[in-house]
Amino acid sequence: MTSHLTIPALAIFDMDGLIFDTERLFMTTKDGVMKEYGYTQQKDDYIHTLGTCGQQLLDILHRLYGDDYPAEEISQKCRTLVTEKIRRDGPPVKPGIPELLAWFASNNIPCCVASSTKHDIVVEYLRLAKLDKYFAYVIGGDQVQRSKPNPDIFLAACQRTDIKPEHALVLEDSENGILAASNANIPVVCIPDLKVPSEEIAKKTAAIVPDATAVISLFG
């Protein structure tokens, strides 16, 4: 892994677990909701779903908990509870994110969000955190056919502004997100959240850093 990166033409941010400390919140909330339905969630099982959505997420959940598992009902109830908390208390911004976004802005590097979460929810969370001014656009998981680790969402982010993938940079926390960036041929920096990537997946990153402010030093 390199310690120096070329300044990108576009910075692509994941949201949950990267901009906001929402993966931990969602996982804890889901623990409670699943118990109401008679299911028990293991942390490793939750981590396995990070970055996925749509049919791919449903396939994973049904494989883990059985064909009768009411995946959409439980996920929707969790999202409602999490959104209610975020509307009440504000989104929990991860350390260094405002500073990193300000640095990109000061260097005239456009930023966007490419998240497996639905577009409208991403837009709302960014607005509530007063970070929306830093992002030129949002690509949500409901706007692409295949979710991470497929490259679709990151390729869509590049196509939106006609940026070649190799000239962009992805910021991710999850293994599925790293794989998606790698599959899109986009350099990726990992800021781990719930899990440090495995040795095999770590090899696909340009760097792994402890927090968002550490990303700035990679361009030195």
Image: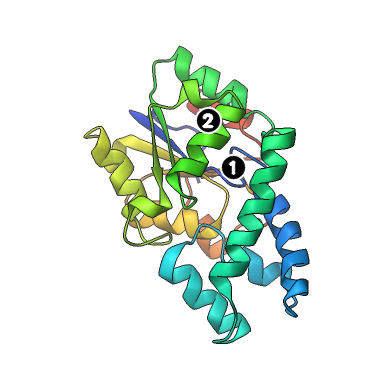
Of residues 145 and 151, the one nearer the viewer is: 145
Of residues 182 and 45, the one nearer the viewer is: 45
The image quarter in which residue 86 lies: top right
Of residues 81 and 160, the one nearer the viewer is: 81
Pick whichever of labels 1 and 2 is earlier in the sequence.
1
The image quarter in which residue 108 lies: top left
Q: Which residue is mark 1?
A: 18
Q: Relative to residue 173, is residue 46 depicted above or below?
A: below
Q: Which residue type does callout 2 highlight?
A: Leu
Q: Residues within 10 Å of mark 1 (few under 14, many from 20)?
A: many
Q: Which residue is mark 2?
A: 218
Q: Relative to residue 36, is residue 178 depicted above or below?
A: above
Q: Position of residue 186 (x, y in %)?
A: 35, 46
- Residue 2 visible here: no
Find the distance from the CA under tag 1 to the CA under tag 2.
17 Å
Q: Secondary structure at mark 1?
A: loop
Q: Relative to residue 44, is residue 39 depicted above or below?
A: below
Q: Position of residue 216 (x, y in %)?
A: 55, 25
Q: Count of labels shown?
A: 2
Of marks 1 and 2, the one in the foreground: 1
